Image: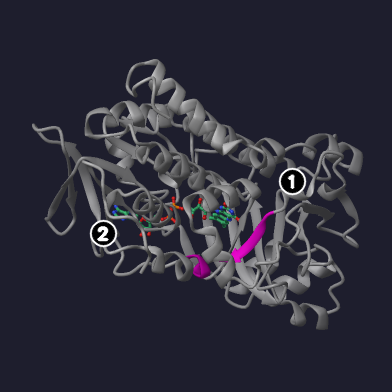
Amino acid sequence: MSSSPSPTKDFRVAIVGGGMCGLACAVGLARKGIRADVFEAAPKFDEVGAGVGLGPNALRALKGLGVLDAILARSEDAQQTARQMLYLSGIGAHEEVYDYNNSSVFTAADNGIGIYRPVFLDAVLPLLPDSTATHFNKRCTSISTTASGSQCIRFADGTTHEADLVIGADGIKSTSRNAVVDADKKKLQFTNTVAYRGLVPMDTLRQEGVTTPLNTRLCSFIGIDKHLITFPIKSGKIVNIVAFATDNSVPVGSVEVTGPWVEAVPQQELLDRFDGWGHDVQAMLKHLKSPSKWSIHALTPLDTFVRGKIALVGDAAHAMTPHLGSGVGQGFEDVFLLCELLGHPSTNLSNLEAVLKAYDTIRQPRANMVLERSFRAGAIYESFGKPGYSTGNEMEGHLAGQWEPIWRHDLDGDVVEAVASLKEQGSFPAVTD
Ligand SMILES: Cc1cc2nc3c(=O)[nH]c(=O)nc-3n(C[C@H](O)[C@H](O)[C@H](O)COP(=O)(O)OP(=O)(O)OC[C@H]3O[C@@H](n4cnc5c(N)ncnc54)[C@H](O)[C@@H]3O)c2cc1C
């Protein structure tokens, strides 16, 4: 149990969804003296047994939320691994196409880490204080505003809960999004890309004669309509593998996935997809014995993440393709700014709507910028070999500089800017910090 301060604010928050963003938010709010309830649809908090890459911006947000040290303490990746990408040809002898390490502007501060997702839960759950109530098997079905101005959350089991403010952290298939954005203003669509995921021990790959430095580098094997990303977790002992394949014969948005978005598939499907790719790729795929296939969906950018006293964070707000490994990092940036603003001494029940608007003004354009860059990155990776994308020089022209605006963003500057705007418009007194 953590030593968060006793709740001091005059408003109560409900967080819908206890994934990485919802839980980071719960800890961040508790540290600011704000009472919160977390409502999770599943019977327990859970994370898929896969890795997740966290860029330097994500690490700074987690530090600001007070959870980074706990994550690093539980992760064998406390020694930051070099996060910058080495691009290699997927076919032939995997010749180097472009090394982000050699970018003229790259600095050590641009490093990130890869962690095993369940480590996040191990680290964060003990930080939740008694004042944060967690409720399971609570699937939100709708949120409405009562006559008194509070938010009423309805659940699939027929129960309801009232709070002064709701944070929708219920992921890509968010229900809370329905309370914030009208149906004609939001589109969640299949990107025509599927991703096969799995973990393989580095020793196994060495025995297969793999020579690519998968234990120390973030690698992207690129080629036409397909690419495969790897990064080391558990101090390089395990390689996290995500193999992407895209059907570019039809426009994005024209295909609807009617079955499950995540399913176990026979290994042969994966091997067939990457038939003809180079040795190290084949060696990795050979050891993905029971791969899961993810139909990658993404939102078209939302106009807003906020309505009244409901704010969206994480994939609920900006579900994006994973091609820049930045989805949850943007969620952590959302949560960091939101916690800083809600915990500000001048925030109280009377100015919550203005505070959420200030959050939206900063977060909506930035997260949507990352969403659009991620989509573009996937298209570039899967064009290697096409005219204009065939050589290292051509690829460098497309790839260089794609991460710096994401990695180097000034998160504290966001807080300063939001507080200044709240003072300027009279929602915060001009004289306090
Ligand atoms: C293949 C792949 C690789 C990725 N790699 C990376 C990466 O390397 N780096 C990165 O930054 N991002 C990556 N991402 C994206 C990242 O996984 C997501 O951005 C992140 O998980 C979003 O977190 P979240 O908390 O917003 O949502 P989620 O993790 O989806 O959590 C939502 C929670 O809400 C609960 N819930 C859902 N509906 C309801 C409801 N109606 N009521 C109550 N609870 C509900 C769910 O059970 C869940 O616990 C990747 C994604 C994919 C698909």
Q: Nearer the viewer, mark 1 or mark 2?
A: 2
**Which one is nearer the viewer's eye here, 173 or 4?**
4
Left or right of 226 in this view: 389: right
Left or right of 172 in this view: 64: right
Tell me the residue at 77%/74% (across/down): 283
Disc 2 residue lies near ligand 1 with CB under 8 A: no
Residue 201 position within the rendered picture, expressed as x and y whole percent measured from the top left:
70, 78
Quick check: is 250 in the magenta stretch?
no
The image shows residue 317, relative to residue 47, as above or below, that is above
Residue 107 position within the rendered picture, expressed as x and y whole percent measured from the top left:
79, 46
Quick check: is 116 in the magenta stretch?
yes
Q: Which residues, given as a range, are shown in magenta?
A: 112-120
- Crowdedness of circle 2 by 10 Å Cα count: few (<14), some, many (20+)? some
- At label 1, which amino acid type do we have? Tyr
**Which one is nearer the viewer's eye here, 80 or 98?**
80
- At label 2, which amino acid type do we have? Ser
Disc 1 residue lies near ligand 1 with CB under 8 A: no
Q: How is the image coloured?
A: one colour
Report if residue 322 is visible in the image: yes
Q: Which residue is mark 1?
A: 381
Tell me the residue at 27%/28% (across/down): 351
> Which disc number belongs to residue 131?
2
**Secondary structure category for the residue under label 1:** helix
- Mark 1 / mark 2, whichever is N-terminal: 2
> Which disc number belongs to residue 35?
none
Q: Residue furthest left?
A: 147
Report if residue 361 is visible in the image: no
- Crowdedness of circle 1 by 10 Å Cα count: few (<14), some, many (20+)? many
Residue 325 position within the rendered picture, expressed as x and y whole percent measured from the top left:
62, 51
